[in-house]
Amino acid sequence: MLDHGGLINDLNVKTTDRLSVAAAFLLPICVVASFFQPWVLTIASVPLLTIVLLNRGFFSLLARRRSFGFAIAAIPAYWVYLVICGLGFVIGVTSHLFQRLRRTRGHPD
């Protein structure tokens, strides 16, 4: 994607997926901030609901195949998946930028 000059909407990189990853990172920030400002904990429901609503098709599938309780129990695992996806993106972009920087300074790969 970086070589093509922008983000594309394809497979696991749709806009809804990127918003889900952003919400996944916002959730623990809200929880940590709530230790200093308890009212922020109420805001933590926004990224959580965003994750569930943007991925309601997946959670509906889990509810149909297993149970509603199973779908609810899967939310933390899905949150971990989203965080790992976000970290992978950051690592990939960072690696790409460092490689580009090395090439511009004349270092072989």
Image: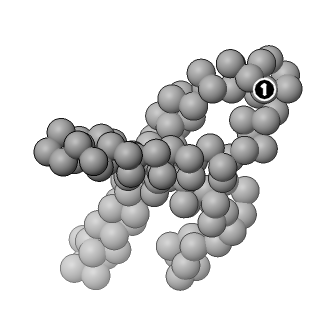
Can residue 29 be seen here? The reply is no
- Left or right of residue 103: residue 49: right
Q: Secondary structure at mark 1?
A: helix
- Left or right of residue 89: residue 36: left
* Quadrant of the rendered image containing residue 72: top right
Can residue 71 be seen here? The reply is yes
The structure residue drawn at horizontal position 66% and vertical position 53%, both measured from the top left corner, is: 54
* Quadrant of the rendered image containing residue 38: top left
Q: Is residue 1 above or below residue 40?
A: below
Q: Which of the two residues, 19 or 68, is positioned nearer the viewer here?
A: 68
The structure residue drawn at horizontal position 56% and vertical position 47%, both measured from the top left corner, is: 49
The residue that mark 1 highlights is 63
Disc 1 crowd, CA 10 A, few/some/many (<14, 14-19, 20+): some
The residue most toward the front is 39
Q: Which of the two residues, 70 or 6, is positioned nearer the viewer here?
A: 70
Q: Identity of the amino acid at label 1?
A: Ala
- Left or right of residue 89: residue 60: right
Q: Is residue 58 above or below residue 95?
A: above
Q: What quarter of the picture does the N terminus occupy?
A: bottom right
How many numbered discs? 1
Residue 48: image location, x then y, percent: 50, 44
Q: What quarter of the picture does the C terminus occupy?
A: bottom left
- Left or right of residue 64: residue 58: left
